[in-house]
Amino acid sequence: MSISAPHPDVLDASGWLSTARQLPSPNCDARPEGTAIELVVIHNISLPPGVFDGDAVIDLFTNRLDWDAHPYYQGIRGLKVSSHFFIRRDGTLIQFVPCALRAWHAGVSSWQARECCNDFSIGIELEGTDDQPFTEAQYQTLAPLVQLLKLAYPIRAVVGHSDIAPGRKTDPGPHFAWRRLDETIA
């Protein structure tokens, strides 16, 4: 489900977005007390890599992934991760963690000399890979989502996972249209 326009009324006090499909993940916890949400982190994910038509990402974020369903899953067996939002190739928006809570999306990370980016960020996963462009529908969902988050929280920057975990992560990858996002959220 896409957001038609940024509007503060669609985000409740705990940070659930009424226009997103809500699938709560157990992979989250409380943010440190008094920590403001200042960063949006853009990622990409597909499971197995390059496969876009399935529920494996949903199953991973909700701890229901069948580790034996694909050989790739053996390398991530037992991983407990989540993201606040996931945007499918068709633009469908799914929310796993309310914004008030800390999703487990960034891992070992640092932004402007601050460690543990999960503490002060919102994670948005785009269904995709580093090797392929993202879809028009994904940008049409992403831009208003970021605009809404900027209205609701004191967001100081929108960055890629590669920006906060250089050398460890490469997403959202070279095909992500940063200029396009910057122009639409300015």
Image (spheres, helix red, strand yellow):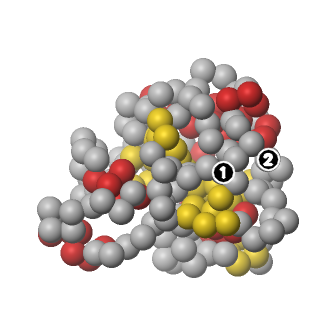
Q: Nearer the viewer, mark 2 or mark 1?
A: 1
| Nearer-N-terminus badge (2/1) | 1
In the depicted structure, whether residue 84 falls above or below residue 137: below
Q: Which mark is residue 2?
A: none
Q: How many marks?
A: 2
Residue matched to label 1: 99
Left or right of 145? Residue 69 is left
* Label 1 crowd bin: few (<14), some (14–19), many (20+), radius 10 Å: many
Is the Cβ of the residue at disc 2 closer than 8 Å to that at disc 1?
yes
Say whether residue 136 is visible: no
* Label 2 crowd bin: few (<14), some (14–19), many (20+), radius 10 Å: few
* Circle 1: residue type: Cys
Residue matched to label 2: 153
Residue 156 position, x and y percent, is: 80, 53
Name which residue lies at 45% across and 45% down: 23
Instruction: For mark 1, give the secondary structure.
Output: loop
Left or right of 164? Residue 22 is left
Residue 68 position, x and y percent, is: 15, 68
Instruction: For mark 2, give the secondary structure.
Output: loop
* Circle 2: residue type: Tyr
Name which residue lies at 42% across and 70% down: 80
In the depicted structure, whether residue 151 falls above or below residue 167: above
